Amino acid sequence: MKKLFLGCFLMLCCATLSFGQEEAVKDSMEVFFKLDKANLLDESTEAITAAFEKNKERILKVRVTGHTCDLGSDNYNMGLSEKRANSAFEYVKTMGDAYQEKTELFFYGEKEQKYDTRDENRRVFVLFFLEDDDRDTLIKTGCAEAFIEKGTYRPTKTKKSAFALKSFDNTKVLKSNNISVEDTEGRKLYFNSVVHFKATFEGAELAAKKAVKIKMPLVNEQKEGYTFYEGVDKGGKIVWKNTGKPCELTAADNCETYDFDWMNSGYCACAMQRECEDDCNDDAFSGVDRPDLTAANIRYSAEKTVAEFEDGTYADLNAVTVIDDNNKEEDLDLCEQFEYGIATSDWFPNKHKMKDLKNIIVKSETSPASKTTRLYLKKESLKDVSEPVILVGDRHTKGYAKYADNVVSPTPCLGSVNCEYLVYDVPSTGVYKVGDWNSGAGKPKMEDKWVLKVRLLKESVVFVGNKKTGEVYKAKNATRNDKTRPKEYVIYDCDNVGDLVVYVQNSTKPKFKLYQEALVSELKYKKAANMYVMRRLKFTKVQDFSEAELTKCK
């Protein structure tokens, strides 16, 4: 393991180069040792050789210091650090006889625990004091670079100047350095590179006579629209001023950078203004873009409702289609509820809580896996909805869709996608209902109005459907004189009795089943008893209720 500090001291994406002490430029490097060992590794000798070769024409003095980790006693570690320093010193002398006179030897045992890990603290630090005469200077940390041409800071000599270069690539680091994501007008930005460069002389900031060539490394992929911003200090917080200069990409040596000639010191960045206020994403460097409709994991409807599928949601996406069911044809009508023998509360128990606008149906030849699907709905299509949500449904084994209380609200602050879409991360059931959800809404009060008498049939199941509202309920047994009547059923009040359809199923006969369907208004009405009567002779025999021919519910 080795760490080379070539012309700078690298740590946490920060590079510094300092001059002035003992009138020399400092360059340094470190080599590392195995536990309880003082012999140089092959990679360490190679690193030392390379460093001396690079600096051989400029070396004024060399300082070698030995160090250990905190394992062992103080005395033992002091001796071990001396052995490590001597080991490096002996190898330095092989670089040339002159280095014996130019080299100082120090050892500190475990006193200077520079690193967080013990492996890195088992080290020898080699410091070079180099001759300098205001020459061209390159500072580099990763792909970030600052090239200071000779004479940039005249009349102050370069050897008495100090330069610092930092690059930033995440929001947390920006916040910790009190760097805002807003410009001078208070508008939020997205960044693709942020760099800090500073030139000082004895603590005072220097004014450049020539432009410093800055290379700013990309954090994300290049996009059109990034421009060069300069940082402005407002009360200790950095905000950004747009220079109007476009950021153009340069690629070399595995680095992609934005290159600028810059006369100033401080913070600079390549950034772009966010498209809309709805893009309140906290990440300064990246956000969710609009969905790529050509992507392999994307399917969308004719109205551009987009579904983005996790890998493995469907075995084959070629047969998957997304449908905007604007007429809610997937919902069960009266006849379908009668056919399945279910009430509205069986497939949509909280219909009263939702003002539904449409369904979104993902059709496929196979059932989806237990994954998450991201749905993108055009905001324009929901502009009149105050609290647009998706109610996630699933498929009954008989094939119809049913909906419980799995309510999903849109995910805000994702990125520029929020300028055009509402985004929902939903379970991959393939059945979704869109609309306003009111969790506090109570069920409409159902008041007893009439009694239905089903002659000669006991233990029947009676469904009452409202053709106007599309709702079906199972009629409960009527009670008169504190006695439950198995042939009499309660019909609830409604605006118009002509909208009510009754469907009766009876399966008590061992060899056949009986059913009858009728409009309530067609039945005989006994005003004195407030009772409608279904005659026994009108019931039809079938082997299974699926054979029932329903017409009154249509």
Image (spheres, helix red, strand yellow):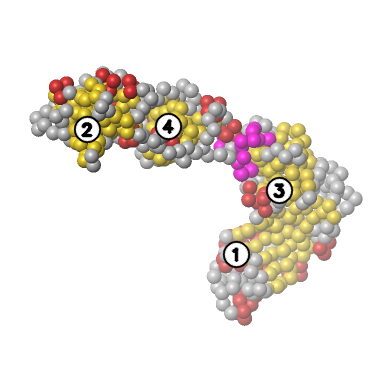
Q: Quadrant of the C terminus?
A: top left
Residue 488: mark in rendering: 2
Q: Quadrant of the N terminus?
A: bottom right
Q: Earlier in the sequence, mark 1 or mark 4?
A: 1
Q: Earlier in the sequence, mark 4 or mark 2?
A: 4
Q: CA distance from mark 1 to mark 2?
A: 83 Å
Instruction: Name the magenta segment's main secondary structure.
Output: loop
The disc labelled 4 sits on which kind of residue?
A: Lys
The image shows residue 180 at horizontal and vertical percentages of: 70, 46
Q: Nearer the viewer, mark 3 or mark 4?
A: 4
Q: Nearer the viewer, mark 1 or mark 4?
A: 4
Q: Nearer the viewer, mark 4 or mark 2?
A: 2
| Residue identified by numbered label 3 | 179
| Residue identified by numbered label 4 | 433
Residues packed near mark 1 inside 10 Å, few (<14), some (14 to 19) or many (20 plus):
few
The disc labelled 1 sits on which kind of residue?
A: Asp
The image shows residue 146 at horizontal and vertical percentages of: 74, 46
| Residue identified by numbered label 1 | 116
Q: CA distance from mark 4 to mark 2?
A: 37 Å
Q: Earlier in the sequence, mark 3 or mark 4?
A: 3
Q: Earlier in the sequence, mark 3 or mark 1?
A: 1
**Front position in the image: 358 or 470:** 470
Q: Is 284 contained in the magenta span?
A: yes
The disc labelled 3 sits on which kind of residue?
A: Ile
How many numbered markers are drawn? Answer: 4
Q: Which residues are magenta?
A: 273-289
Q: Earlier in the sequence, mark 1 or mark 2?
A: 1
